[in-house]
Amino acid sequence: MPTEQNRPTFAEENRLWQAGYRYVAGIDEAGRGALAGPVVAAAVIVPKESQRCGIWAEVDDSKRLTAAQRNQFAEEIKVQAVAWAIGTTDAVAIDTIGIGPATKQAMQTAINPLAVPADFLLIDWVRLPLCPIEQQSFTKADQHIVSVAAASILAKVHRDALMVALNTEYPSYGFADHKGYGTARHRAAIEQFGPCPAHRHSFAPIAPKATLL
């Protein structure tokens, strides 16, 4: 587990709160690099008064947490956040518009229904030029910014659940285990069975394969 010194902090949120912004939303995605399933984004507005108490003292980049920790933290984040929302873009749309625009679409879909409108966005890596809300993007924001780390957890947990559901529909591929990423087992299943409708047919090594289940 990361130490207290390298956990995400409230430095960026504090800077914005002190500048007069109140509802700062962290935005992150899950599934951008997968070969199957949707890309999922989450938006989380952290309470200004929270600082390092409650769940906010524990959140971290979802990739540095166990599945059990992510599931537990996701439930607590939903209770303690000022507002949160999820956006998804499915594999068909990814193939149609490309993964970059699809990721931005998922993020915008997460921002729109926030119960409390955000007045500033902190985003992991991506910029949303069509979004009118003031924003700033950061490399590896989920490792350094509390609200973005919280969003990474919600996005990952939601997407994992979707992939488990897809595993029931398409059991040959092992989606429940690898969540659609390009593991050796997944690539072998694609080679054996061909891609299914849940796959991103514009992604290598699937793109050259025309036969669908």
Image (cartoon, helix red, strand yellow):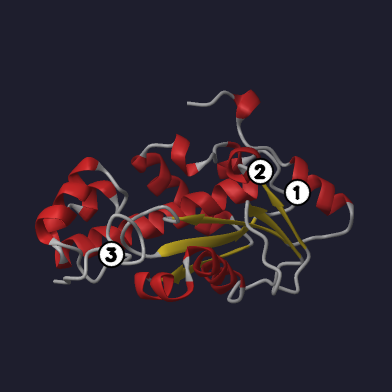
Q: Is residue 75 visible?
A: no
Amino acid type at image mark 2: Ile
Q: Is residue 95 above or below residue 9?
A: below
Q: Which mark is residue 145?
A: 2
- Residue at image position (74%, 52%) is 48
- Tag 1 secondary structure: helix
Q: Which residue is mark 3?
A: 199
- Tag 3 secondary structure: loop
Residue 28 placed where, x, y %?
Answer: 56, 55
Q: Residues within 10 Å of mark 2 (few under 14, many from 20)?
A: many
- Residue at image position (41%, 55%) is 31
**Which tag is nearer the camera, tag 1 or tag 3?**
3
Amino acid type at image mark 3: His
Residue 187 placed where, x, y %?
Answer: 21, 49
Q: Is residue 135 above or below residue 94?
A: above
Amino acid type at image mark 1: Glu
Residue 1 placed where, x, y %?
Answer: 47, 26
- Tag 2 secondary structure: loop
Residue 130 placed where, x, y %?
Answer: 69, 74
Q: Which residue is mark 1?
A: 13
Label pair 1/2, CB-CB below 8 angstroms: yes
Quadrant where the C terminus sits is bottom left
Q: Residues within 10 Å of mark 1 (few under 14, many from 20)?
A: many
Residue 119 lies in what quarter of the image? bottom right
Q: Residues within 10 Å of mark 3 (few under 14, many from 20)?
A: many
Residue 43 lies in what quarter of the image? bottom right
Say whether disc 1 or disc 2 marks the residue closer to the N-terminus: 1
Measure the C-alpha gap from mark 2 to mark 3: 32 Å
